[in-house]
Image (tube, helix red, strand yellow):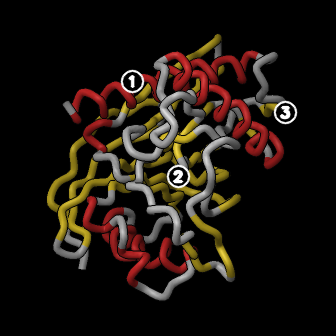
Amino acid sequence: MTKIVKRELVGESHGIRAEIVTHNVWPLEANTLVLQLPEPRPALTAYQGYRRVSAICNFYHPQDLWYVMDNRRLTFGHYFRWIHREPLLAIVPGQQAAVLSTGVNMDRQAVAEESFEEVWVQVWATAGVKTNAIRVGRDTAFGIERGGNWQPFEEQDFPSPGTINIIVLTSAKLGQAALASAFITITEAKTAALLDLDVRSSYHPEWQATGTSTDQICVVSGDGDECWHVSGQVKLGELMARAVTKAVTEAINNSRTADV
């Protein structure tokens, strides 16, 4: 049974309430960044797809939980729902929530906001790049998924999870296509942050990293004017990219400082 230890208000703006909730996951203490929306809004998430949500939760999983999936006969989808079911019921009871998870403590989170006239973009990020930063397309995979089950390759060790999680909220109303195209702009902006910081692949330090092997994104639509384009050639895309690069850069630096 999940027990709430404390709730700490981080900030409140645009009707969005942000707090860090400290709680247990079985006998272990963990915490979760919770963003409460003023009303249900359309969102696109990397793990759950398209849905309407009233909250976004970024879960920190302590190291002792990292390999739980390897010890249970669950598909990844079942594992994802199983490990978050009880905390969700305790933290955001009765709400439809978008879920992200990471091995990075929420005390290291970062937030950035960019605006132009009536349009704003707010980004929350956590980032750990010490253990499994990769250069996608160059570093090789660690395993394969068959029937929803993870099968690691015997010749490779499974990496210690490090993750870049990015939550993007905006005043602009975004349809499904715009939410999907936002993933492109967000990913490019994240990679720009890694290039600026000269983050290297954890497995081939001679290569610059483009991300980690477990990165996650959640984009939430607003209720303002509808926007169809989210690329860098339009103002919304520029704002989104600037905020993502700022938040990811700060989040990486927060984790690096904490690891010293």
Q: CA distance from mark 2 to mark 1?
A: 19 Å
Of circles 2 and 1, the one toward us is: 2
Let me know if residue 203 appears in the view: yes
Q: Amino acid at mark 3?
A: Trp
Task: Identify which residue is drawn at 27% across, 60% down.
Answer: 63
Q: Residue furthest front?
A: 155
Task: Identify which residue is drawn at 57% across, 57% down.
Answer: 53
Let me know if residue 127 appears in the view: no
- The residue beneath circle 2 is 214
SS under mark 3: loop
In the displayed structure image, the side of residue 167 where residue 254 appears, left or right: left
Q: Quadrant of residue 231?
A: top right
- The residue beneath circle 3 is 228
Is tag 3's residue or tag 1's residue first in the polypeptide sequence? 3
Q: Position of residue 40 (x, y in %)?
A: 58, 54
Q: Position of residue 181 (x, y in %)?
A: 78, 39
Q: Amino acid at mark 2?
A: Thr
Of circles 2 and 3, the one toward us is: 2
